[in-house]
Image (cartoon, rainbow, N blue to C red):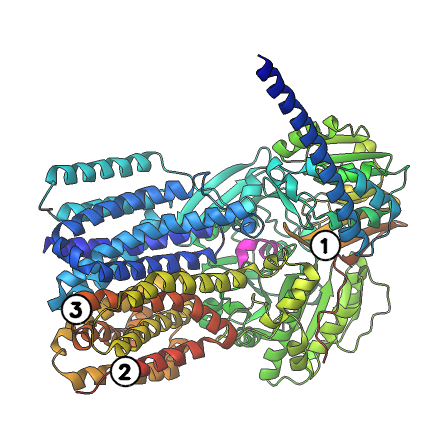
Amino acid sequence: MKAFIIISLIFLFATTGSFTQTDDIHKLRRERMVTNQIQLRGLDHKQTINAMGIVPRHLFVPDNLQDNAYDDRPLPIGHGQTISQPYIVAYMTSIINPKPDFKVLEIGTGSGYQAAVLSEIADSVFTMEIVPELYQSASARLSELGFDNIKIKFGDGYYGWPEHGPYDAIVVTAAAEFIPPPLLEQLKEGGKMIIPVGSPFMVQSLILVNKKKDRITTTNLMSVRFVPFTRQE
Amino acid sequence: MRKHLAIGLISATIIAYQLVVMQIFVYTQWHHFGFMIISVALLGFGVAGTYISIYSGRIIRKANSFIPWIIVLTGFLMVLSVPLSQSELIRFDSLLVFTNFNEKLKLAATYLVYFLPFFSGALAIGVYFIEQKKVIGKAYFINLFGSALGGVLILFAMWQFKIEYLPYINAIFVFIAALLINPKYRKKLYYSCITFGLILSILFLIRPIQYKPSQFKGLSKAIALPGASIVEDKSSPYGTFHVVKSKLLRHAPGLSLNYHDPIPEMQTIFVNGNWAGALGNYQYADSNFYLRSSVFELPFKLISPERILVLGAGEGTNLSLAINHGNSNVTAVESNPFVIQWLKKSTETLYVSDQQSHLEIYHSELRSFFMSDTTHYDLIMSPVLGSFGGTSGVNAIQEDYLLTIESVKELWNKLTNNGIATFTTWIDYPSRYPLKLLASLIESLNELSIANPDDHIVAIRSWNMITFLLTKSSFTDSIKVNDFCEKMCFDLVLLSNHTSQTEECNSLQDSLFSGYLIRLTTEQNRMFYDSYDFNIQPATDQQPFFHQFLKWGSLQKLKKVFGKESLPFMEIGYYIILLTFIQVIIIAFTLIILPLLLKRIKTRDKWRIIIYFSCIGLGYMFIEIVFIHQFILYFGNAIYATAAVISTMLLFSGLGSYYSQHLIKKNHHWLIVIGSIAILLVLTQLFSLTILHQTIGLLTAQKICVSLIILAPISFLMGIPFPIGISHLTSNPEKAIPWAWGLNSYFSVISVPLATIIAVESGYKWVFILAATAYLLALLSVKRQ
């Protein structure tokens, strides 16, 4: 009996210790991610850097990929979707320049990570997901982690979420070969919309949509600023 | 006789199995994985040859019992390979292979699962060859004839049965082959095994395994949408065909940001699991039609076309718009027969008999259609290039004869005096598709000796698409184009003597893209091809790889820019071919050549044997690949061209092999044959393309006769060197036959990816020249007696 209690206590301490250790490791990895992948690439948007340093990305990826959560790459989350590369999430967040009073709409919740990062800066985030399994898992995760200012809805992103519009910013993380007219309508005057363009594992550019005096314009932002792609002649 | 029949049958089932597995991979993964299966099949043959060579003594002694049992084993391996490869345990996803170690292990397991049936089937054939060493020409004929028959029959089967059933139907024929042979011992057990195998095959036929396409393919994503349903599910030699219905699917490429009305929902077509078009969106003469607010509308703002040719009509956008404008006679061409059926069904009620306009729908490969068609058109609309977000190079090694310089020149000649041809592409980053497209248009006009080519090209851009117009008469009037752009919030990016005064609607972070376009219209364009980090040199009929952009010399830079992990996703198709090639060289060398070298087989003229059988292996496959490439354009159908070439070559090579027995004792006759092959190859290369181009308008039956005239003589001759080489060059046939077979297979294995790499880098002409050189080397390696 004594032996059983001792073994149980050792096991209890060991596992508690390992939890603390694991959390520390993830925190360290997150700090490194922010320094090496975001700040070293020249991104200096303070609120974004702060948010990226807070949100536990490893809790937004499948269990078997937790050790890779802070790698400089996108990761699969199932159903043909990915969680974007940390730098892309940070870049998209910084481009829309969210403020504490912002109301942001996200189309394509996926893992919920982008919404979580936005929620650390903005007042409220409304996010929509069309794949039922992703909606359920993201919904449970965001509520469990206490992201109270995120509202999630299961539905077709084409129509947006007019009940809460207009929005200061809209982030379209799902592939969008065209911009749905209802989303443009739900964007505030002076608001910004951002759309990543690329294959599932490689965002190659970002489209920033501006709405000023009812005129819609776009700017193609290169996610990688190493142009030109010509050799020295 | 029964054994000959059984070997013929097993030869047929092996090639049928290879084609079925290729189809499965093209559906579940992507096109380039088909190449992996060819290599795995040939590797199975090569390793079998080596194995027999090493253990020949033991195998020959027991050949009578070995052949039937190994055929039974092949049947079981074929039945089980597909369910195993589709099981959660080893089913891999090609896009995850580069990011996940487990996926690499699964890929290796898949290799093994598909290698084993080829290996065991080839063992049966190899042992049979040794048994029949005195009549090796006849044995080789039976093998080749069986393979040819298998290649043709499986195409018919692909029309009759869905791809899920074919592996098991094929396995039933393997067990029938086993039934044809009586083993000497353990007959009860033998027939019990066959019965069990047949029952197992039938059970799988009753409840076949459903293949799942990669989760990253369009079909997987579409059917994951709530309420989505598959309304049509068919398969054929063209691959799988699905129509998905969902209230959430919409398609509006190149749409203006100023369009405010709803975008209609539509049914979507998927071919081999990839998005191929949108249906049910055809509205006759409706001025509020949403696509009138897209970049595709531009030509209709400039002319009122009476005759419109829509190429690749199944994609939907161009055809919808052409129909919508009414008052035109529209000719729609589509290569997939199932898509044709749906197009006809969707459009049958649009046109009424008293209308002036009408729609004609043709089933043909696009280039082949206008090569044989004599009509001139006011507007020719080419299919949309690339895809939203880029293609990641998945089509890199897919030939595209529509986008070669020769093709653009032919299109130009089909235009009426004021005619326009349109080419629309998705914008990618770093820019590849728009630049290569413009380079192709400019080079084509240069070759046509058109003065000031840039007077004939107009381009406008939305936020994610660019449309190029190629105008038959010079076009400098910018007013209509400007008005349209201003109204739709598009940007005019190319128009001779025009400088934009208005602020861009869709700007780029830097102005390099416009600069690149302008450089391509100047005389410095070729310098630009060299300096750009991607291959944007226009494609030609000899190098018809428009979608291949990778430059090996730029890899380091791209790695630095995008990171090591992202690199494979830049141009994944060509990357996989290179990886396949390297893997195949290493694995095949380790499993085929090394054991043979270590075994120290005693035979005279070892090096002559190595050179001779290597060269004829390499030469044969190179020729086959070049012919397939030439006949795809001729027949207008890749599947039938491949089947026709492979089957004709195997059949006539088999006959040549059979005839070779008459030449065995005549050394000089044999040398004349090999020399003739090299000469005939050069003559074929000089004249075949001209003959094929001149006769492309003939009926299919007539074309088959022409192809027989070209293919039969050379194939007949190419069947002679292997069996005759065995008789002349080897003093110890038991050892040397499998060894020669192994060498021959090794070079056949590596020749598949190698020929593709040579064709992409230097063109098919060089593949042909190297094939002729290989036969000449084989000739030189023969000792004169």
Q: Tell which subunit mark 1 falls on.
A: B
In the rendered structure, the answer to whether residue A202 lies left or right of residue B485 reads: left
In the rendered structure, the answer to whether residue B778 lies left or right of residue B215 reads: left
Residue toward you, B428 or B665: B665
- Magenta region, residue range: B312-320
Name the residue type under label 2. Answer: Ser
Q: Is residue B370 visible?
A: yes
Find residue B733 and name its label.
Answer: 3
Residue B346 location in percent, x, y? Answer: 52, 47
The quadrant of the rendering that contains the C terminus of chain B is bottom left
Find residue B17 and name its label.
Answer: none
Q: Are labels 1 and 3 assigned to the same chain?
A: yes
Q: Is residue B547 above or below residue A45?
A: below
Alpha-carbon distance for marks 2 and 3? 19 Å
Name the residue type under label 1. Answer: Ser
Q: Earlier in the sequence, mark 2 or mark 3?
A: 3
